[in-house]
Image (spheres, rainbow, N blue to C red):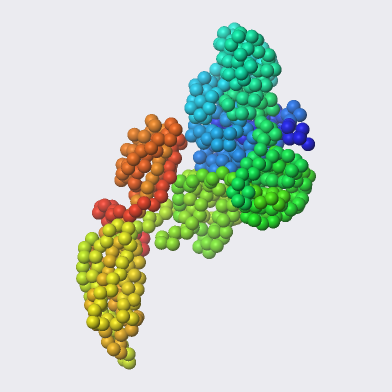
């Protein structure tokens, strides 16, 4: 059985959107005989992009999986999304891959999400290799891409294939490990050729550099190299493979998926040099005391699996995708979800192949499988045979933009919430909350496109329409002037009347003080049992200020005088007197509007800092400092929330997708008078 594990390869195609991952996967499956005709992303007929939203947008939205056989090995391909809107679906899948293939656009080079994928590879110490794709395109440049990848992936890159021809005349490559050259015809058929004469000297130098790079990994080889001895090809390959598995560097090869150049070589390369589950070795789990536990890829050990993806189907229920880390599974059985501390039962073991699901009878370490209808299990959970251990789950990517949502049909309120809750099980990049103050349901995600696609999914899967709009800002009101007023409630209508009379002093307090109530009644002019009623009246009235109905904050009310009636006074009468007193005071206390100010941290490449700081200033922001993290700068600023509601797409366009930001509430500050006037007019018009 360990031989079976040895011949398994789990490889994630990672990189920026548009680099050609899905097209490359299609070409690899075609070459392997899994499909009989090549689909195209533009035509919406690829095996990996099969969801309606993917075919419409012509891009991957979810990670797709398919298994194929090549040279007596089994390769599981994971085609991950490269768009930042859907990158959380990639991030949860990277830990269960044993290697990453970074697919790079030969024209544009590595981009923001390539850097994110590279960071995941470093975090899990995964081996990887670089595929410079689209080398048949105008302005494609292999050498420039390699240099850019060193910086983006923060790793040494060692090319092992060099292109023959460039741009539209790209027709093959030289493999410097084998020293052979290959050219491809218009039909995608490959033939072995001599190394072109104009490349011979360069390839000689490249081979020498390659040998030197590999010799440095092994003391014995280095000694031979320095003494001018010839290094045996078998030793060179073995040391090269070990260097790849130890993630000392990333090899780089070249391809054009559309011309089928280098496609079979990629599968060969995965088998020869990428990690099997045995090469990946032990996983680290935590026991119930938080101490580390080693989990080995041993088929005879107790079962342990990690759930990395959930697919929600309105009819079939939840489908949980997991990787078997140790032990074996049969076609049905019981498992323990140690994250939720609950028992689960499955009656069918499945393998995912694009949009198809195949029933299988067993799974061993390294297998990527699925089961349906687990009651409590979600993405990030650990399943075991009984041991209380947990595999640490990747942190969800932070949401960067929020929208208020509501159903298109008024009576669909419950349906929309139920649908979103199910989608949240599937998508770790989404966050749902209720904003009581503005009475809005807020859905946060990775970008506007992410939220729009979620709305489409909800319509398709659960037949309920959803509208999205910019959320309302939770403004506040406060006062600038100290004032003393009377609040008097008197009503006589036969029998007992109503009588409450109080004098209050309203005065402003420093920002963040909230509300204070002070009792300075002397001589019993208002009985003690009526004072709390005055406070209750003030509190209730202050919930809707006088400018635009926002809650009032940062003020003190002191009740210092009043009168009462032995028969007609009551708690209700004094509560109404308190309300009247507050309203009278607020009218003359120079009320002003306050807005929430966010503490924002924007992480950008160094060459973007000037543009970002200028933009933050234009948003009424105030830069309060800068930090650096690797090759990125972090700009810390205080910015009004109203100016940050649509910041995510703007930051993305200013930094070519390389900028990220986080923000949290810091304080309330006064809105400039001209803007306050517009906000007050708009809010009052909406009410009418």
Residue 328 placed where, x, y %?
75, 44
Q: Quadrant of residue 82?
A: top right
671 and 244: which is toward the camera? 244
Residue shown at the point (36%, 38%) measured from the top left = 626
Is 119 on the left-hand or right-hand side of 524? right
Residue shown at the point (73%, 35%) measured from the top left = 5
Q: Is residue 63 visible?
A: no
Residue 164 placed where, x, y %?
59, 15
Q: Report how many numbered discs are placed on residues in the image.
A: 0
458 and 126: which is toward the camera? 126
Q: Is residue 291 visible?
A: yes
379 and 355: which is toward the camera? 379
Residue 674 placed where, x, y %?
25, 52
Residue shown at the point (57%, 34%) measured from the top left = 121
Q: Determine the residue located farthest toward the bottom in the rendered image.
A: 495
In the rendered view of the protein, which quadrant contains the C terminus?
bottom left
Is 306 on the left-hand or right-hand side of 569? right
Residue shown at the point (66%, 38%) measured from the top left = 282
258 and 605: which is toward the camera? 605
Residue 99 placed where, x, y %?
63, 33
504 up-or-down from 637: above or below = below
637 up-or-down from 152: above or below = below
Is 522 on the left-hand or right-hand side of 429? left
Q: Quadrant of residue 217?
A: top right
Q: Quadrant of residue 668?
A: bottom left
74 up-or-down from 160: above or below = below
In the rendered view of the protein, which quadrant contains the N terminus?
top right
């Amino acid at each position: 059985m360990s031989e079976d594990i040895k011949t398994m390869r789990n490889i994630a195609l990672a990189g920026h959107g548009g680099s050609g991952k899905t097209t490359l996967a299609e070409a690899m499956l075609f070459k392997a005989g899994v499909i009989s005709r090549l689909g195209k992303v533009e035509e919406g007929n690829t095996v990996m992009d099969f969801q309606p939203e993917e075919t419409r947008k012509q891009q991957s939205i979810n990670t797709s999986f398919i298994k194929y056989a090549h040279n007596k090995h089994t390769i599981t391909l994971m085609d991950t999304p490269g768009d930042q809107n859907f990158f959380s679906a990639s991030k949860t899948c990277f830990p269960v891959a044993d290697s990453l293939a970074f697919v790079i656009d030969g024209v544009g080079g590595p981009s923001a999400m390539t850097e994110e994928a590279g960071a995941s590879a470093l975090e899990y110490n995964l081996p990887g290799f670089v595929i410079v794709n689209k080398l048949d395109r105008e302005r494609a440049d292999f050498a420039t891409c390699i240099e850019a990848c060193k910086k983006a992936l923060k790793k040494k890159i060692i090319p092992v294939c060099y292109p023959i021809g460039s741009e539209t005349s790209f027709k093959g490559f030289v493999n410097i490990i084998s020293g052979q050259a290959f050219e491809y015809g218009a039909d995608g058929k490959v033939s072995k050729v001599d190394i072109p004469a104009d490349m011979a000297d360069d390839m000689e130098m490249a081979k020498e550099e390659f040998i030197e790079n590999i010799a440095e990994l092994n003391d014995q080889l280095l000694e031979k190299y320095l003494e001018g001895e010839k290094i045996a090809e078998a030793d060179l390959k073995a040391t090269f493979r070990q260097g790849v598995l130890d993630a000392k560097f990333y090899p780089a090869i070249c391809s054009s998926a559309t011309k089928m150049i280098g496609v079979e070589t990629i599968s060969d390369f995965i088998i020869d040099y990428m990690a099997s589950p045995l090469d990946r070795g032990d996983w680290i789990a935590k026991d119930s005391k938080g101490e580390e536990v080693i989990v080995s890829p041993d088929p005879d050990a107790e079962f342990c699996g990690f759930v990395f993806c959930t697919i929600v189907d309105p009819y079939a229920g939840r489908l949980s995708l997991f990787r078997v880390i140790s032990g074996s599974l049969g076609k049905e059985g019981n498992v323990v979800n140690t994250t939720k501390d609950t028992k689960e039962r499955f009656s069918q073991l499945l393998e995912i192949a694009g949009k198809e699901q195949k029933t299988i009878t067993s799974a061993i370490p390294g297998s990527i499988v699925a089961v349906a209808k687990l009651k409590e299990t979600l993405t990030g959970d650990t399943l075991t045979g009984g041991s209380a251990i947990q595999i640490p789950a990747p942190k969800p990517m932070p949401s960067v933009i929020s929208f208020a949502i509501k159903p298109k049909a008024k009576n669909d309120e419950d349906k929309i919430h139920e649908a979103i809750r199910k989608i949240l099980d599937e998508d770790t990049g989404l966050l749902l909350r209720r904003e009581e103050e503005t009475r809005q349901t807020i859905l946060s995600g990775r970008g506007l496109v992410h939220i729009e696609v979620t709305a489409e999914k909800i319509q398709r899967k659960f037949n309920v329409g959803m509208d999205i709009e910019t959320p309302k800002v939770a403004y506040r009101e406060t006062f600038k002037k100290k004032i003393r007023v009377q609040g008097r409630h008197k009503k006589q209508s036969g029998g007992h009347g109503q009588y409450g009379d109080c004098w209050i002093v309203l005065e402003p307090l420093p920002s963040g003080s909230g509300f204070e109530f002070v009792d300075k009644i002397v001589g019993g002019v208002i009985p003690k049992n009526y004072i709390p009623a005055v406070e209750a009246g003030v509190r209730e009235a202050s919930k809707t200020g006088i400018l635009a109905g926002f809650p009032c904050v940062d003020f003190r009310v002191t009740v210092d005088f009043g009168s009462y009636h032995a028969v007609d006074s009551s708690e209700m009468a004094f509560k109404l007197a308190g309300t009247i007193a507050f309203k009278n005071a607020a009218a003359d206390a120079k009320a002003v509007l306050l807005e929430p100010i966010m503490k924002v941290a924007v992480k950008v490449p160094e060459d973007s800092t000037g543009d970002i700081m200028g933009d933050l200033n234009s948003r009424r922001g105030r830069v309060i400092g800068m930090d650096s993290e690797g090759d990125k700068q972090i700009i810390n600023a205080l910015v009004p929330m109203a100016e940050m509601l649509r910041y995510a797409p703007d930051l993305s366009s200013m930094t070519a997708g390389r900028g990220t930001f986080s923000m949290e509430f810091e304080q309330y500050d006064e809105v400039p008078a001209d803007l306050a006037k517009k906000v007050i007019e708009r809010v009052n018009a909406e009410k009418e």
